[in-house]
Amino acid sequence: MKAVAIAGPEDVLAASRYEDRADMLLFDAKPPRRADALPGGNGLAFDWRLIADRRWRLPWMLSGGLTAELLPEAARISGANAVDVSSGVERRPGDKDPDKIHEFLKVARSL
């Protein structure tokens, strides 16, 4: 799986070069340019319209700032049928909340 950091249209175009090199793509928000920023798991979303209506030769997943509340809109706009969640189900960094996980899965199953 190749994680592709998305901030603008140029990042989406660059993702196509991995279609012959990966088994799956994961679209995540490009991390901010800060010393404490992680390569992922920053709880940030990107503009899902950037990947809307795109056809990829590989399966792909949506990631980046997803929560139970945002998931329906994110899936509708992006067309995602697979998602990755981390910070969106945490109480604080690294501390997963079972209730948030339960709610996220409930919403995901309803889509």
Image (cartoon, rainbow, N blue to C red):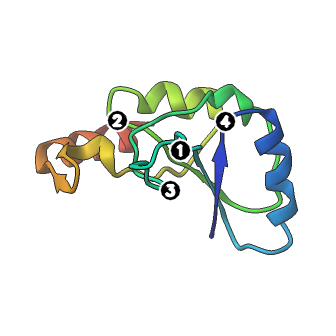
Mark 2 near mark 1, Cβ–Cβ under 8 Å? no
Provide the secondary structure element on which disc 4 rests. Answer: loop
Provide the secondary structure element on which disc 1 rests. Answer: loop
**Which x, y percent locates residue 39?**
50, 56
Dot 1 crowding, Cα within 10 Å, few <14, some 14–19, many 20+: some
Return the residue at label 2. 67
Identified at 58% across, 32% down, the residue is 46
Return the residue at label 4. 7
Q: Is residue 64 left or right of residue 49?
A: left
Marks 2 and 1, the one that precedes in the sequence: 1
Task: Say which of 41 and 69 sits in front.
Answer: 41
Task: Locate the N terminus and report the quarter of the image it occupies.
Answer: bottom right
Marks 2 and 3, the one that precedes in the sequence: 3
Between the residue at mark 2 and the residue at mark 4, the CA separation in whole angstroms equals 19 Å
Return the residue at label 3. 39
Task: Locate the C terminus and report the quarter of the image it occupies.
Answer: top left
Return the residue at label 1. 31
Between the residue at mark 4 and the residue at mark 1, the CA separation in whole angstroms equals 9 Å
Identified at 34% across, 35% down, the residue is 67
**Which x, y percent locates residue 16?**
85, 55
In the image as oriented, which residue stretches furthest toward the front? 35
Identified at 33% across, 26% down, the residue is 69
**Amino acid under disc 3:** Pro
